[in-house]
Image (spheres, helix red, strand yellow):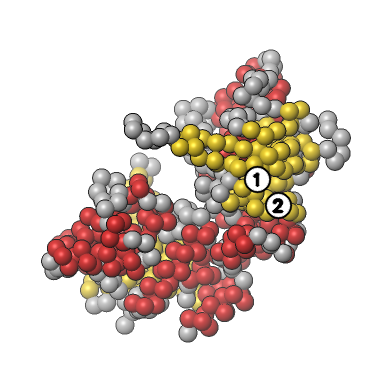
Amino acid sequence: MPLLSVRNLTVTFATSTGPFKAVDGIDLSVEAGQVLAIVGESGSGKSVGMLAVMGLLPPTATVTADEMRFEDIDMLTLTGKRRREIIGRDITMIFQEPNASLNPCFTVGYQLEETLRQHLKLGRRERRARAVELLRSVGIPEPAERLKSYPHQMSGGQCQRVMIAMAIACQPKLLIADEPTTALDVTIQKQILDLLMKLQTEHRMGLIMITHDMGVVAETADRVIVQYKGRKVEEANVLSLFTAPREPYTRALLAALPENATGDRLPTVSDLVAAQTAGAAR
Amino acid sequence: MSAVGTPVLEARDIRRDYTVSGGLFGRNRVVHAVKGVSFSVEKGRTLAIVGESGCGKSTLARILTLIDPQTSGEFLIEGHPVDIAVTRPTPELRRKVQIVFQNPYGSLNPRQKIGSVLTEPLLLNTDKSAAERRDLAMEMLVKVGLQPEHFGRYPHMFSGGQRQRIAIARALMLSPSILVLDEPVSALDLSVQAQILNLLADLQDEFGLTYVFISHDLSVVRFIADDVMVMYFGEAVEHAPKDQIFADPQHEYTRMLFSATPRADPVSIRRRIEARA
């Protein structure tokens, strides 16, 4: 049985100019121990779809699906109370801006222990010990000291490590990472991706990696979903996506990678769409 | 016009220190943001400056664009020494160097129409009439791949890629000879990034522009640069032609940067999958 299975997910936003469909009939499933990458440009609905699964969308959004199931729990009919028990414990999420995701008014130790207090029955000492252990496991030096730090006293990479520590605090079955390294330098990005993959393997977590970076996909994913304008364009395992992409849009995305440039011009997606419509007209 | 082979931009042992206040009782500290960097760029070529945040690359950009003075060192534009701490730069000098910033959402005033964004540099630095300014702005809009009817619109009506085109158009209004591009594509989607990189290459050919391209993305640098300078904690640890630096990186930090860059080729994917299984 898949860890998460979603069928025909649609998210519509009520806007002043009428309804806007951000996600349009997406199917996806993740198994335990599997890394699924969802790749697409901004506006492709890749984040919105996952926020819908988490139940984090604003009231202006209407979420419909034929099925949205986490293990044997139906996520569509879940009460708020039950959802809050699952979210943050069994399904967790980390976001793009590590500095913005942490509360600047509280120490990282307080915020980390808050997660533990909410979901696990631990005493105060045990919580403290677990928090230290978590910070150590995400590679923060002098973890006991760092618990007293405020987010602004830490670098972006360290804040993202704290976010990861919070996300794995209750040993979740599914971790959703929304562009976890976009705001970070390449060397830090490498460290964070390595850390995520190490934790994913150790705990046999399901991991959904939302990204626009084909390099990140290549370095992490088992399976890949390519999304464009709210629809799924292609789904494939990572190797066949890079060696034999089936859809023109995927091919265009790969061709637009600067390292794949052959001449002194980069092919763009609009070039390809134009070539296609010309071909179709003929 | 500079003769062929003479550098348009030359820096000799540029240093920049900042004093950081130590608070009420602490002692002031000096941060050496740029610790003696030398380079030169010839007309029509692109120098890429690579490094991670805090390495001093943006400080260097601020010195090159005459926003901040250097603490010491010599800095020449088209052979003329420049030190804005000593003499105020003339309008002629100012129009020679222009800059495009990373964030196209933050670098345009939301209450200023695009037409006014583009004509303002002309209004301040030239004595062209309103009609002339308007015509030049319309022309520039077409050159960067936008339409003349965008003249009267506001920044929020444009996408990120279009805004970056506007920022490039604004930088080119005074026909500069040097364009400093501070991470111009890192906030953009892959396909839009490709369009902007193509546009920059076209504009460089058309106007004979010299680029200083600041980036942390090595695949972009590999596409656009002629020479690459790698900075690490305020020092230039490696400076070489592009092909040489990519084929045979000398410095340990450069090698680390290369190995940290995600690779999207099937060989490394296959190797990773095998290691995982």
Label 2 lies in what chain? B
Q: Quadrant of the N terminus of chain A?
A: bottom left
Classify residue A197 by image quadrant.
bottom left
- Which residue is found at the position 64% from the left and 17% from the top? B130
Q: Nearer the viewer, residue A233 or A137?
A: A137
Q: Is residue A199 left or right of residue B70?
A: left
Classify residue B182 by image quadrant.
top right
Mark 1: few, some, or many residues within 10 Å (few <14, many ≥20)? Answer: many
Q: Is residue A31 above or below residue A94?
A: below
Q: Is residue A83 visible?
A: no
Of callouts 2 and 1, the N-terminal one: 1
Residue type at mark 2 is: His
Classify residue A33 by image quadrant.
bottom left
Label 1 lies in what chain? B
Mark 2, residue position: B239
- Which residue is found at the position 24% from the left and 48% from the top? A106
Q: Quadrant of the C terminus of chain A?
A: bottom right
Residue A220 lies, in percent from the top left, at: 48, 71
Residue type at mark 1 is: Phe
- Which residue is found at the position 76% from the left and 45% from the top? B45
Q: Are marks 2 and 1 in contact (CB under 8 Å)?
A: no
Mark 1, residue position: B213
